[in-house]
Image: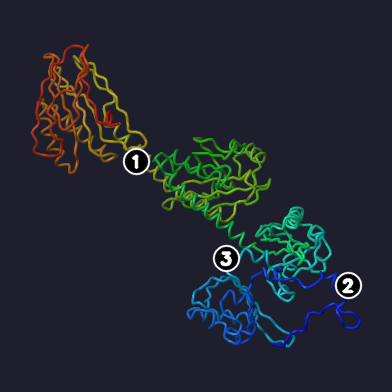
Amino acid sequence: MRATDPVPAPLDQAGGVDPSALEQAGGAPSAPGGLLDLLSVAAVVLDARGRIVLWSPQAEELFGYSAEEALGRFAGRLLVQEKHLDLVNGLFREVMAGGADWAGVFPMRHRDGSTRLVEFRNMRLEDDRKDLYALGLATDQARLHRLEQDLALTTRLVAQSPIGLAVVDTDLRYVTVNPALERINGLSAAEHVGRTVHEALPFLDTESIEAAMREVMDTGVPIVDRESVGRVAADPDREKAWSVSFYRLEGSNGKVLGVATSVVDVTERRRATIEAAQARQRLSLVADASIRIGTTLDLDETARELADVSVPELADVAAVDVLDSVLNGRAAVTAQTGPAVFRALAVASAYPSEAVRAADPPGEVARYEADRLVTRCVNTGHPVRVAHVSADDLPSIARSPEAAELLAGAGLHSYLAVPLIARGTVLGALDLKRTRNPEPFSADDEVLAGELAARAAVCIDNARWYRQARNTALTLQRSLLPERPPAQPGLQIASRYQPAQAADEVGGDWFDVIPLTGDKSALVVGDVMGSGISAAATMGQLRTATRTLAELDLPPDQVLHHLDRITDRMGQTITTCIYAVYDPHSAQCLLSNAGHLAPVLVRPGRPPELLDLPTGAPLGVGEVTFHTTAVPLNPGDRLVLYTDGLVET
């Protein structure tokens, strides 16, 4: 490399240094401690072959090698571990070939054998002979944040820096800007120099920028990595973000010269950060939905859980509507073009809004024509999204002209409907609206809503099938039970059958009152183990068998003996049962127990008592002996027979 020409100095006419010019330039040379000394950035220059041709004292401090030890040696072999050599050589070739400048953190080998993480900025240089060199600027990673505030480069280095750099004087007027800052601001250097920040960049928040510069100039405390967001003249339609640092510049005598600023375009980093935060929020919402949706098999509760999860993170107002045909057990049509009849199940809002009044109240049935967006959603099985709702869109969203006016008044500006699909069947739709949230529904929102809808649809479908199965079992069970026990001589009979709640399936509990000869009455209470249609059907068979055996006027223990054999032949059915025969003429009740809860006897003026009966084994165990116990019943006595559903909680 040829030696460069010396930096021109102010000369008098005789060729000497002009004292007045020297005084204007700041007086005598300054002592060590200027900005370049504070920079602590190592500079290394490599020729086209990768040999070190320039080695700064800071490089000696950073890597431990003196200039004599470093100059003329291949930088890769001197500073890089063997395993990283191929990577470094490739990066070097890319830089020298005119590729993009390379910046990053890299492990470097120190003279003492240790490895240090070093922050690099690498770029290609070209001299006036068209010879190419590689310039590497490096500092210890711990000095990363101090780099911008201490940066003081020569004119050539500043010109090649990928970081936007500028100096303003004490009047906050631009003195110099580098090409990188020209590109960032979309203005040439000439459009900067001599102007204040406000004059050059009126499209930014210049008031806060100039206030920060004055603060740094007054206090000497740098402001580092301050994020600024705005739009520049070169790209007015796109919001950008920059990381800006300010630090005060001083002369050797301590005189404040101005403020230096460095600007890094971090638009992509900010966008990535925002997207990562949104992704975390979406994952959190999906995880929350997994916990909150489907806590019960109640259809209405499941729909409310879906609506509640959707606000306010995803929408301001959410509604869940299910096709009425699906609720009525009719097969859903996979693809249709006509109107759809919905039953509203749930509506949720992040805050009081007229948009809630525009939705169908839960429990109501509404018919939507084919031109409505929610109808299109369920007919096609695909989401329908209107990112920006106009007045012309409202009639296709609202259920009526009055509802359209309510939505307009509420400020509806974005709409999204996603189908509820489970096991290949469209069950209904999740209807989402944004009124206060200023962001329109995006493709990512559509994916998230689809994920919530898919998870909830399975729960809704389970609840739907459970409701149908429960209703079927309940209908079967009620059809097999006596509607009203007949009046029997000597007895006042009261009974109550209470089906299980929605969280449980219908069971196989039954009771019966059977008239016998001689004015006697058989009283039966039984419980088939299990639940659902199977238990109800088994209960019906046992009730029929019990009535048939009762006609034979057998003792209670013999009736249970025959029922045990019948139950055993039915397979894995286990049933408990109390069989009692009351004779009003002898005022005596004969009871036999097959593993059932003991009856309660209530006598006037005395506390209730559990009858001490041999428990016996449940029906279906096989080869079990049952016993009959006689209990006298006086006028006014009450005998209570029940199943475990009465007492188990």
Q: Earlier in the sequence, mark 3 or mark 2?
A: 2
Depth order, front residue of 273/510: 273
Is label 2 or label 1 in front?
2
Q: Residues within 10 Å of mark 3 (few under 14, many from 20)?
A: few
The disc placed on residue 151 is none
Kindly identify which residue carries mark 3. Answer: 142
Is label 3 or label 2 in front?
2
Depth order, front residue of 484/106: 106
**Regarding mark 2 in the picture, which secondary structure is present there?**
helix
- Dot 2 and dot 1 residues touching (CB under 8 Å): no
Kindly identify which residue carries mark 2. Answer: 20
- Dot 3 and dot 2 residues touching (CB under 8 Å): no
Counting every numbered tag in the picture gives 3
**Regarding mark 1 in the picture, which secondary structure is present there?**
helix
Instruction: Please provide percent x and percent y for residue 561.
Output: 10, 33
Q: Amino acid at mark 2?
A: Ser
CA–CA distance between discs 3 and 2? 43 Å
Instruction: Please state if 4 lies on the left or on the right of 88 as rendered.
Output: right
Kindly identify which residue carries mark 1. Answer: 469
Instruction: Please provide percent x and percent y for residue 531.
Output: 28, 39
**Regarding mark 3 in the picture, which secondary structure is present there?**
helix
Which image quarter is the N terminus in? bottom right
User: Where 228 sits versus 130, above or below?
Assistant: above
User: Where 352 sits versus 276, above or below?
Assistant: above
Instruction: Please provide percent x and percent y for residue 85.
Output: 51, 81
Q: Earlier in the sequence, mark 1 or mark 3?
A: 3
Depth order, front residue of 625/168: 168
CA–CA distance between discs 1 and 3? 67 Å
Which image quarter is the C terminus in? top left
Instruction: Please provide percent x and percent y for residue 252.
Output: 76, 67
Instruction: Please state if 538 lies on the left or on the right of 260 as rendered.
Output: left
Name the quadrant containing residue 120: bottom right
